[in-house]
Amino acid sequence: MKKAITSLAVATLLLSASGVVKAAENKEDWDEPVFIKGADLEGQDLQQTENDLGVDDNYETYNVNVNDVSNYIPNSSNLSYIYSSATIEHKKWGKGVDVKIDTPDNITKVTSEQYQNAAITAGIKNAEIHIASVDQVTGEGALAGIYKAYEEKGNNLNAEDIQNSNQEMNDLGRISEENKGKDGYSDEALNASIADIKEQLADIKQNQDKQITQQQVEDTVNKVLDERGLSEILSENQIQMINNNMVNVANSNALTSDPKAFKQNAKDVLKNIEKNSDDLLNKAKDKAKDLNTEENRNLLQRIWDGIVEIIQSIIQFFSNLLNKL
């Protein structure tokens, strides 16, 4: 029986990884990598999942069942079994959040770039996350399992940051789906913009004691989308959706409690996306230049002039009609 994926899936994976950071900082026992195992995996399916994720005897295992999903994700799907799995390992060397989907055919909706951005929102740093499933899944089991693992390790996750992270993943996935196939658009370009916005918001917070204002968020969003060529591609509703999510980021515990670390984390993710997807990012910028040509501006002006002319004609008609009365 197949399960359709949802952005919640590994969003959490990433989310909870924030525990990785807390664990390291609090000198909790994160020396061993963690394997989040779907409770209904057994036999060949379990062996295949372990092989996909590179799990061996050195991994500390946490089982996640349907009751855990209901407990940690109250608004989850009505699941009857759990197969989705993940591993999280704290980086001993290097920084940032790396996400790899080891079974991309079975994680069909959310991209690794979306997972990385969700991780930043949740406050995760210095973590390597792998995701896998033997079948197409929602991923909610893996998500709940991560929450469970971090709680049992004594790490408290910020509930609002987790909620905002899930919302962000859903919204970014929706925007990518709505723009799928559109000339100049790519999921990589969108997520590079989101990471860029987060880095700049953290920089603002670093340089002021007061809370980031909504106007500062809006100005940053518009500036980055314009620079990266997406302001001419995304709809007003989609840009507003991004604004709403970035307001949540600006107010998040992850950013306000440590803007310096948050900024570095966002910067690392941005560099990673730019390194692997430079051509796709340039396509958005090139498309924006094409849309902003003199010819297109003149066309828009002619359309606007025509609308104004029609309105003026209607006004003149009624004005003449009233004068005759």
Image: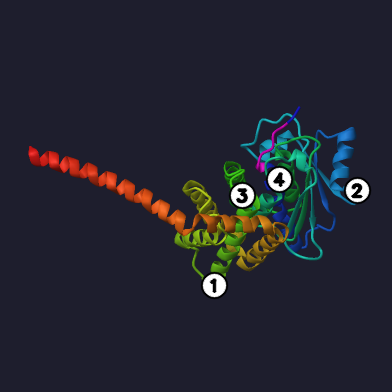
Name which of mark 2 and mark 3 comes first in the sequence.
2
Work out which residue is located at the far left of the displayed protein and give it.
Answer: 325
Query: Which span is picked out in magenta?
Result: 3-8
According to the picture, the residue beneath numbered tag 2 turns out to be: 56
Q: Nearer the viewer, mark 3 or mark 4?
A: 4
Describe the element under mark 1 as helix, strand or loop. Answer: loop
CA distance separating discs 2 and 1: 45 Å
Q: Quadrant of the N terminus?
A: top right
Q: Amino acid at mark 1?
A: Asn
Describe the element under mark 2 as helix, strand or loop. Answer: loop
Rendering coords of residue 85 (x, y %): 78, 42
The answer to which quarter of the image holds residue 93 is bottom right
Q: Which mark is residue 10?
A: 4
CA distance separating discs 2 and 4: 21 Å
According to the picture, the residue beneath numbered tag 1 turns out to be: 207
Q: Nearer the viewer, mark 2 or mark 3?
A: 2
